[in-house]
Image: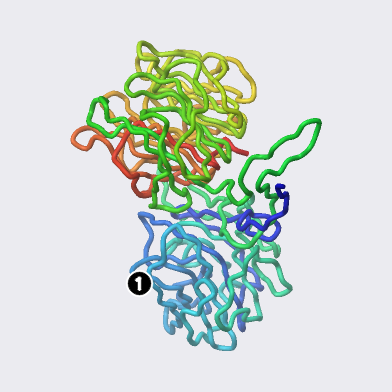
Amino acid sequence: MGILRSDRVSGLGGANAINGSVFFPQNSFINVEPDSDLAFPGDFTIEMWTRLLAGPNITDNGRQLSSKGYFTAGSDGNWYFGLSHYSAAEVLFYSYDGQSGAESVPGNIATPDLDRWYHIAAARSGSTLKVFLDGSEVGSGTLSKGLDDGGNNGLLIGGNSKYKGTDTYGDAYGWISNLRIIKGRALYTADFTVPTGRLEQTSDTVLLCCQSPGNVLEEKTGKILSHNNHQVLTILQSAKEASAERLAPDVGEDHGTTFADNTKFDTLSYMVPPGGTTAESNRGRAVFAGGYSGGPSPAGAETATITYAQIQSMGSVNDFGDLTAARWIPSSGASSTRGTFGGGATPTRLNTIDYVTIATTSNAINFGDLTTLRTYHAGFSNSTRGISGGGNDGSSNINTIDYITIATAGNALDFGDMLEAKSQIVGDCSPTRGLFMGGVVPSKTSTVDYITIASTGNEQAFGDLSAGAASGCALSSNTRAIYAGGDRGSDFINTIGYFTIATLGNETDFGDLITGRASVYAGTSNNIRGVIVAGFTPSPTFNLNSIEYITIATAGNANDFGDITAATRGVTATSDSHGGLS
C-alpha cells in the first residue's frame, strides 16, 4: 500500500526557509539613508548570507556593506564589513577615518568558492569584535571606535563606499540575502549553528533587508532604501540596478506532499500520482542529449550520449545514459519529472521521440513519433505539453508544429503551422507562450514568432532579432527568453539578446558569450541561471566542449561554467526547472 504524507524538504522557500535575495551587478549598490539607529557606540551584530561571482572590475577591497564616510578625512567612526574571494581572502571588519587610527579585525580564510552561499557575521561585545564564517569564529580583535558614521552619512549595501558615498572602493559582485543588523547586543560570542530560516525582526533589529524575491528596496524596520550607481556612463549605456531574486541559500525546511510507492486515490476508477518524492522534483538538473563529435561535415559521428549537470553548481557533468538511437539536433522539452527528445538526424532524418525520468539516471525509452521526419527544429515545453516546430525533413524546410502530452506516451499531434517553413530554428517559452527565433528560409531570418502553448493554431508574429541568425540556442525564465550565439554566414555570433515573453517586441541586447559559437541548440535553465552548451567554431577549433552561464534576470556577459564530457555540437538540452514550468 502506498503512502501519502507530509515530508520536510530543505530549501523550498516556504514559511521556515529563506525565499529571497538581491543580486548586485558591477557598480550597482543600495543606499540606506542616515538614521540615528545606524550609529553603533556599543555592542552590535551584523549578519547576512552572500554568494560571490568572478567579475572584471572587482578590487580586493570589495565588501558587502559599509558606512558612506569611509576614507573621508574628519569622518570618524566609519567602517566596512564583508567577505572577499581574492588570494588574501578574508572576512574583514575595518574602521578608518581617512587621517589616522585604523582598527581592523580580519578573519583569514582559504579563498572561498565562487557561486556558493556563505553566512558571515560580525559581533562586538564591549571592545572585542569577532568575525564568523558559516558559524565558525575566524577572527577576533579590539574595536573601540564609536562607529557613528552610519547615523551621520548612511550605509551602502553591495560594496565599500568612499567619500560619503560619491565613490566606491570595491564592489561585491553577486548576491546578498537576509542582511540584518542588531544594535546593543552581540548575538554571537563563540561558534554557533547558522540560522536555518529567514532572519526575523527582533526588538533590537535596526536593519533587515535583502529578503524579498520581488522588492529589492523592502526593509523591515522603516529605513529608506534607494538605488545607487557610480558607473560613468556614455550616451549608449544605461545604469544597471540591483535586483530582487528568488535565488536564496538552501537552508531550513518546509513541508511538501510526498507520494511514495503505489499510492492510489479511488474514484469511479482510480488515478496514480507521478512516481518519486517531492525531494526529487525541481532539483535544477539539466540534461544534455545527442550531438555530433566529428569534423566539419556530419558523417557518422553522431552520439546517443545523455549527460547531466546541476545548474546551480558549476563544473561537474556526469553520465546519465543513452538515447534509443544516436542523433544530432533533436528537439527537447520537459516537465518537472520527465524529459523528452524528438527527431534529429543520423544523418538520415528521424521522427522518433524518447523520454527519460530526469531524477533517475538510465537509458531513454521510446515515447512515440513526431508527425514527420525532421531535424534542425525547435522544441520547448510547459509542465504538460511539449512542442516541436519547423526543421528540415531531408529534402526541404517544413512549417509544421507538433505537440505531445508529456505525461502520456504516444505519437505527436498536429498543433498548427509556422508563418514560414524554416530550419536551424530555436525556441523557448514561459508557462503560457512559446517563441520560435531566427532560422533559415532559405536565407537567415531575424523573425521571431509565437504560439499559445495550451491552445492549437498557427503561429503569430512577435518581433525580430537584431539581425538574421540561425543555429544559436534559446533558454528562458518564466518571463524572459534568451537568444545566444548562432551564425550569420561568415560570422559566428558571440552576442546574447533577450525578449520579455509577455510583450511583443524586438530583441534587446543582454551581453556577450565568452566564445562565439554556432550549431549550439543546447540551452536551458533552472529559471534563474541559464546554461549554453558546446557548439561549433571555424577552423581549427571546430567542436567545443565548453559550457557558459548567465543570470537571466541581470544583463551581462556570460561566465565559464565548466566542460561537457566531449567536444560536440548539435546537442539538445532541457531541465526539470526551466522557464516553461510554473
Against 529, residue 41 (above or below) is below
Residue located 64% across and 54% down the image: 13
Residue 372 rendering spot, x and y as whole percentages: 46, 15
Is 14 on the left-hand or right-hand side of 406?
Answer: right
Q: Is residue 327 left or right of residue 78?
A: left
Query: Looking at the image, which is closer to me, 1 or 211?
Result: 1
Looking at the image, which residue sits at the far front?
Answer: 1
* Badge 1: residue crowd in 10 Å (few <14, some 14–19, many ≥20): few
The residue under the point 51% across, 31% down is 428
Residue sticking out furthest to the left? 540
Q: Residue at x 56, y 14 (%)?
A: 416
Asked if residue 211 can be seen in this view, the reply is: yes
Numbered disc 1: secondary structure: loop
Residue 317 position within the rendered picture, expressed as x and y whole percent measured from the top left: 39, 48
Query: In the image as oriented, which residue stretches furthest toward the top?
Result: 395
Q: Nearer the viewer, residue 439 or 37?
A: 439
Indicate the quadrant where residue 61 lies.
bottom left
Whether residue 266 is situated above or below residue 452 in the rendered picture: below
- The percent coordinates of residue 374 (x first, y second) are 42, 19
Q: Amino acid type of disc 1?
A: Ala
Name the colour scheme. Answer: rainbow
Residue nearest the viewer, comparing 394 with 251: 394
Q: From the image, tell me which residue sits under label 1.
A: 88
